[in-house]
Image: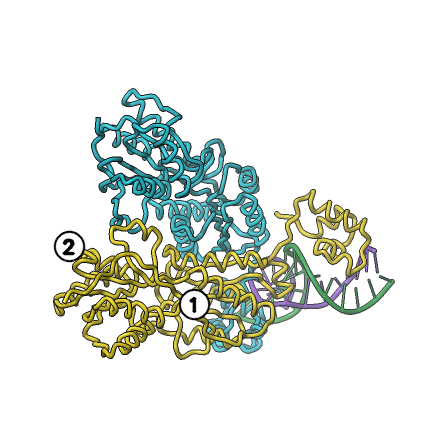
Chain colours: A yellow, B cyan, C green, D purple
DNA sequence: CTGAAAGCGCTAACAG
DNA sequence: CTGTTAGCGCTTTCAG
């Protein structure tokens, strides 16, 4: 099959050790004559020698592999995170194995198991759900683990998430500033950190204006368009006086938008809407959505940095929870509340 | 560090060979007593033994790794392809290493080199550019290689692409049927198969109506929004009688759209537009773009199937070029040409 | 039915 | 300056 170091050594007329040392740029260290080094390198090049990383991994006990687990790689949000990790990993001489958990924790666990068997040196995961025992267990092992996006409030894991609380607060205040007092909230998956932190921000935003959070105004069970549509429908029928929606994800908002247009209403004339996340092509939308945009590449980049730091230093980062700034993108989906 | 088979063997009071055989479900084959098998499995479970894939790979000369190289993982198109490959690979017990070539062939070559060093068993790549010698070389090695999206007309590589020609032909005829005779073409990267096949389809569509392709009506040098904007601008100034644009990618179309709105014109009243590809959220756009949509998951799935077939049979597929159907998504960006 | 031992391709002591 | 050799963790002949 493929060439081995022995072949190169033979071709160069040296021993494997010399060949190994020459090719690994350690000729100096071992005081190998420049001539020999050249010969070896030339032989390797001529033969098209490609050292086996697996043999290397076994010997060095370093696989040079980083695992990335996301719930859905076709979602631009996760793809972007995976990309950032991949780019820095490549830069650092690592390769990335990506795994797609298809939004289920069982898969997530199983895939991580596989990754560990492959001797990955670090793991970044965008967890699916609310359980994290399996992740904590790995972290306890000493393997660097970084969580992205979905974190867990009460865990010592290293995690990087957007500042959902602050973002939600701003969104809320924005609506309040436009006179909205009856705000329908289209939430995502309850129990996840992003969702719950946004609720928290919402509560704080309202509190600033001395308004109590009314849980009857919250609906939704996932970050999907379907959930947005159904929740908007339900809220609107229960509370016809609603003047604005706060959607926790763009799909949620899109669902609401669909309902609104089906009802023959207009945004922002009849109903206002603000949403979390941002989508590509937002500028070309018929309803230019005002959103709280996450800096997705920053999430990925920070995770990657956290990983490389640990890989290099062998030490855990001091700070466990990393919060990425969000920013308001004002478009045109918020109008003045009618009284 | 982590446990070895020896540890399990010790714990179970057997030899490594028996341990290995028991855990690999080959107890029967080796006529190991059920009792011993159970003991071993129990011991392994209790210790939390995880066999080292790298040692296994070395011994078996099978890494269980598939390489995927894309130009930009954050692009939903490529992310979706990567996902499909990942899902089937996972299903087949393989893991996927993804690499992001950042749209340059030099990176692509280098990353593939790394993947080969990792002893990948198959490679799927969405090539960046126009060169393919490096890919053909690998293919010659016997390693299964499948190209997706950007193919190469004159190469014996296995490739799966959309039926760009047929799609372009339909788009062209659609425009012609609406009376458009002066059509500006916003092309992508010339020299790539998708681009050139679309030109071909365009030519055929026109030919059916006895119209000659006028290369002066074609502009553009990449699949980017910038190229779309600039090309539309140039074409419109050179040929003010243009009544419709045929954009080769959604970004190209978006660029044109931006120019059109800057000029205070309306789609489809003043100008019609049809585009290739499809974007998520297209239904929510202010200009509902009529497009020729590719079946992106199908591209990825087919590539994955082609790979698994080869992995299983060890044989090259008979058919090299695989063409995926495209379909017309009629929205509302084409109007009747004014005369 | 079970065990000893070789060897996958590489690196690093150790010995010249 | 260079070569010999052990061994990373696993599977698989080959001998019992």
Drawn side of residue A11 relative to residue B58, left or right:
right
Give the numbered dot on residue A262. 2
Residue at mark 1: A324
Camera-near label (2 vs 1) is 1
Farthest residue, direction top:
B210
Q: State how far apart marks 2 and 1 are (Cα).
A: 36 Å
Q: Residue at x 34, y 55 (%)?
A: A279
Q: Residues within 10 Å of mark 1 (few under 14, many from 20)?
A: some
Depth order, front residue of B321/A153: A153
Q: Position of residue A204 (x, y in %)?
A: 30, 77
Q: Position of residue B318 (x, y in %)?
A: 43, 36
Drawn side of residue A278 relative to residue B17, left or right:
left
Drawn side of residue B9 relative to residue B304, left or right:
right
Report the number of numbered marks.
Answer: 2
Depth order, front residue of A198/A126: A198
Instruction: For the residues labelled 2 and 1, say whether their Cβ atoms are less than 8 Å apart.
Output: no
Q: Position of residue B66 (x, y in %)?
A: 49, 52
Above or below A206: residue B324: above
Disc 1 on helix, strand or loop? strand
To which quarter of the image does residue B228 belong?
A: top left
Residue B325 appears in view: no
Drawn side of residue A291 relative to residue B146, left or right:
left
Residue A142 appears in view: yes
Disc 2 on helix, strand or loop? helix
Counting residues from the N terminus, which is met first, the one under dot 2 or under dot 1?
Answer: 2
Q: Position of residue B303 (x, y in %)?
A: 41, 45
Q: Residue at x 22, y 41 (%)?
A: B332
Q: Residue at x 40, y 59 (%)?
A: A78
Above or below B88: residue B251: above
Identify the chain of the residue marked 2, using the numbered disc in the image: A
Q: Quadrant of the C terminus of chain A?
A: bottom left
Q: Residues within 10 Å of mark 2 (few under 14, many from 20)?
A: few
């Amino acid at each position: 099959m493929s060439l081995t170091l022995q072949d190169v050594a033979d071709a160069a007329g040296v021993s494997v050790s010399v060949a190994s040392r020459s090719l690994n740029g350690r000729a100096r260290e071992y005081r190998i004559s420049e001539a020999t080094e050249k010969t070896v390198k030339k032989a390797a090049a001529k033969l098209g020698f490609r050292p086996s990383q697996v043999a290397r991994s076994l010997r060095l006990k370093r696989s040079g592999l980083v695992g990335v687990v996301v719930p859905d790689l076709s979602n631009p949000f996760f793809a972007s995170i995976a990309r950032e990790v991949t780019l820095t990993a490549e830069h650092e001489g690592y390769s990335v194995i990506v795994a797609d958990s298809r939004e289920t924790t069982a898969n997530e666990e199983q895939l991580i198991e596989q990754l560990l068997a492959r001797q990955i040196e670090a793991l970044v995961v965008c967890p699916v759900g609310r359980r994290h025992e399996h992740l904590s267990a790995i972290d306890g092992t000493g393997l660097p683990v970084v969580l992205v996006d979905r974190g867990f409030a009460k865990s010592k894991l290293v995690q990087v998430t957007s500042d959902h609380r602050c973002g939600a607060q701003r969104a809320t205040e924005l609506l309040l500033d436009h006179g909205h007092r009856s705000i329908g909230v289209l939430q995502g998956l309850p129990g996840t950190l992003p969702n719950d932190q946004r609720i928290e921000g919402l509560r704080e935003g309202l509190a600033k204006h001395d308004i109590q959070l009314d849980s009857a105004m919250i609906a939704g069970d996932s970050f999907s368009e379907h959930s947005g549509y159904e929740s908007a429908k339900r809220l609107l029928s229960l509370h016809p006086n609603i003047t604005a929606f706060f959607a926790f994800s763009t799909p949620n908002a899109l669902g609401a938008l669909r309902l609104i247009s089906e009802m023959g209403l207009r945004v922002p004339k009849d109903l206002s809407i603000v949403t979390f996340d941002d989508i590509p092509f937002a500028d070309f939308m018929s309803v230019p959505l005002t959103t709280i945009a996450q800096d997705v590449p920053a999430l990925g980049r920070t995770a990657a940095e956290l990983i490389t730091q640990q890989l290099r230093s062998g030490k855990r980062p001091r700070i466990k929870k990393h919060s990425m700034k969000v920013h308001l993108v004002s478009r045109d989906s918020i109008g003045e509340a009618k009284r």
